[in-house]
Amino acid sequence: MRVFFDRELDTAATYWRIFRRDGIAFGFTSHDRDLSFGGIKHRAAPGMVPAAIRMTSDLSEDSAGVDGALSHDSIRERDLAAGLFDSAAIEIGIVDWETFDHHAMYSGTLGRIEDDRRGFSAELRSAKHILEQDLVPRTSPTCRAAFCGPGCGLSANKFTSRVTLSGFNLDLNRVQFSGTSGDDFVGGKLRFLSGPQTGMALGIISADGNWLTLDRPLDDAIATGTPAELTEGCDHTLLTCTNRFANAVNFRGEPFLPGNDLLARYGQGGA
């Protein structure tokens, strides 16, 4: 293995690899020219520098940060705003820009991304952040299971429809699909099968007839006729689970468990 910084003058540069959830990979390097190694072309980005990297030997989470300028067309402001880079896998390492020997120093996922119009700052989360999740579920009046996910017992295919975009409104950030009932899809997901937002899951927050309002901004290059998949939503209440889906047996909640407000209630006198 190549030992870095074992000499007075070293031919070393930092590199970053970003793997988005839609299958697209990006590579960048702090070197002054592009470097191709490991099957990925790393574009020169001298303005991108590690802000901080902290590695620990115990179970506490490692942390890192990266600051840089939006100097590449591959990282566009609208893509960041649309969430295309949310929870993307990231690898940071060091590379010899003469021999291309390289070594990864940090791996994790992208967390919160902030953009101040002049540049962006990204929070990086190591694999250890999984250890901070609660292993024992907490009580709740609504169902804790993801709709059609583990514990729900329903099939996503049964509640997913293949549709075609018939209209959109960029100002109101909503879309329209003919032959659909909007109310059934509130809380659900929309996934485009082609176009600039291919593969990205957009949440549906409200409906007005067959118009669906989305939780992330639409790309202005979207066009009618774009194929998509619509998955119905669920409000996670026992009433919906029983009446609409006949799935109360798999309800993962405690709707009749008294809450903290029971202590603050006034007593009711008998008639």
Image (tube, grey):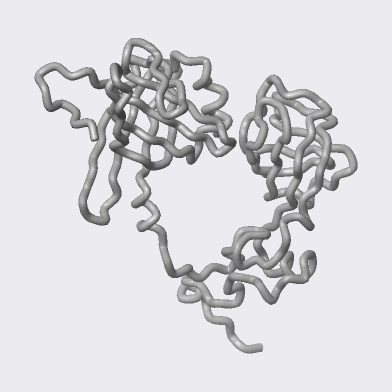
Report the number of numbered marks.
0
Which one is nearer the viewer's eye here, 159 or 240?
159
At x 33%, y 11%, the residue is 32
Q: Residue at x 66, y 25 (%)?
A: 196
Locate residue 147 relative to residue 41 in the image: left or right: right
* Image quadrant where one finds the N terminus: top left
Of residues 18 and 100, the one nearer the viewer is 100
Looking at the image, the residue that sits furthest to the left is 8
Question: Quick check: can you spot residue 10?
Answer: yes
Residue 102, horizontal then vertical, whole percent? 31, 29
Q: Is residue 130 left or right of residue 246?
A: left
Q: Check the picture and name the quadrant holding the C terminus.
A: bottom right
Residue at the far top in the pictured view: 32
Determine which quarter of the picture holds residue 268: bottom right
Query: In this view of the protein, can residue 111 be seen by the observer?
Result: no
Q: What percent of the width, then of the height, locates residue 138?
A: 47, 68
The outermost residue toward the bottom is 270
Q: 214 or 270, which lies in front? A: 214
Please give the name of the residue rendered at 40% of the width and 14% of the height, measured from the top-left corner: 34
Q: Is residue 215 above or below residue 115?
A: below
The answer to whether residue 49 is above or below residue 140 is: above
Residue at the location (90% across, 42% down)? 179
How far from the left and from the top, in percent, is residue 79? 56, 26
The x and y percentages for residue 39 are 46, 27
